[in-house]
Image (cartoon, rainbow, N blue to C red):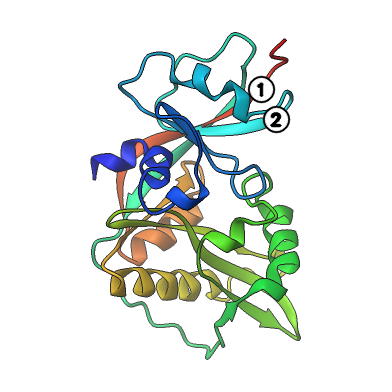
Amino acid sequence: MLKLDNPTWYALTSTHKPFCIGTSKAKRYPANVLPFVGFDADATDPLETLQNEVRSGEVIYIIGELPKLPPSWVVLGEIEGDQMVCEKLIDVKYGDNIELLKLGVSDIPEMYALINSVQPGFFKEDTAKIGTYYGVRVEGKLVAMAGERLKMTGLSEVSAVCTHPDYTGRGYAGQLVSLVVKQMISENKIPFLHVVSSNERAIKLYERLGFVKRRSISFWKIQVGNQE
C-alpha cells in the first residue's frame, strides 16, 4: 500500500509504463492523456530531469509530497484530498433498474464534455483510453459516468465519478462505482480513489460502498514557467 503515497510514479513504472514519458528520476503521462507527473522520491532534484518533456505555460499536477521545483515552476494551488481504499465492497441495493453502459471510443466527446463541465482539469482528450468506463444515459444523453485512472501492480484507481447536476440523487454514482470496483476486484486489484476532503456527500457514498480513508493527500497544481 505504500505505493499509494506516490501513485503516479508507481503507475508509470508498472502497469501504465506504455504511457510513460521521462527519465529514470521523473516521469509523466502524455499531456493529452493525464496532467500528472511522478518522481522517484529518493532522487535529488528529480524534476530538473523532466525539463525537456514539459512546455512553458503547461499546467501539471503532482500527487502526494511536493519535491523541490525547478526555479521557473510555480505552485498555483493545493487541492486537499482524502485517499480511500476498498478491500471489500459493500453491495448496496438500489431501487431503480438502471442500464449501466460500457463506454467506448465513440462516447469520448460526450465523456469529455460531461466531466469537464463538473470537474474540469483532470480528464483530457485521451484519458478514456487508459481504462474502462461505464455510464448512464437518459433519453440518449450521457448524464453520469465512472471508470479507471491510475493503475499499478495490484492496485487500480476509481475515477471520473460524476453526474450531471440535473440528474443527481438518483443513485447513478453508487451503481457505477460498484460496477467499476467489482471489475477491479475480479482482476485481483485493490480499488482506491481520491476525493476532495470537503466533499462530504461523495465521501459518505464511498464509505457506504466499503471505502475507508487511508490518508490525507494533496494534489499540487503547478505551472511550468519559461525555461530560457
Q: Position of residue 28 (x, y in %)?
A: 52, 37
Q: Position of residue 101 (x, y in %)?
A: 58, 82
Depicted 87 relative to depicted 140: above or below: above
Tag 1: amino acid: Val
Residue at 58 percent of width and 62 percent of height: 129
Residue at 35 percent of width and 19 percent of height: 43
Residue at 36 percent of width and 36 percent of height: 6
* Residue indicated by mark 2: 58
Q: Do the residues under discs 1 and 2 have CB atoms within 8 angstroms?
A: yes
**Within-10-Å neighbours for mark 2: few <14, some 14–19, many 20+:** some
Q: Secondary structure at mark 1?
A: loop
Q: Secondary structure at mark 2?
A: loop
Tag 2: amino acid: Glu
* Residue indicated by mark 1: 224
In this view of the protein, can residue 90 be seen by the observer?
no
Q: Nearer the viewer, residue 6 or 170?
A: 6
Q: Position of residue 199 (x, y in %)?
A: 51, 48
Q: Position of residue 182 (x, y in %)?
A: 35, 74
**Within-10-Å neighbours for mark 1: few <14, some 14–19, many 20+:** many
Q: Is residue 161 left or right of residue 9?
A: right
Depicted 121 relative to depicted 116: above or below: above
Gap between marks 1 and 2, in whole Å?
Answer: 5 Å
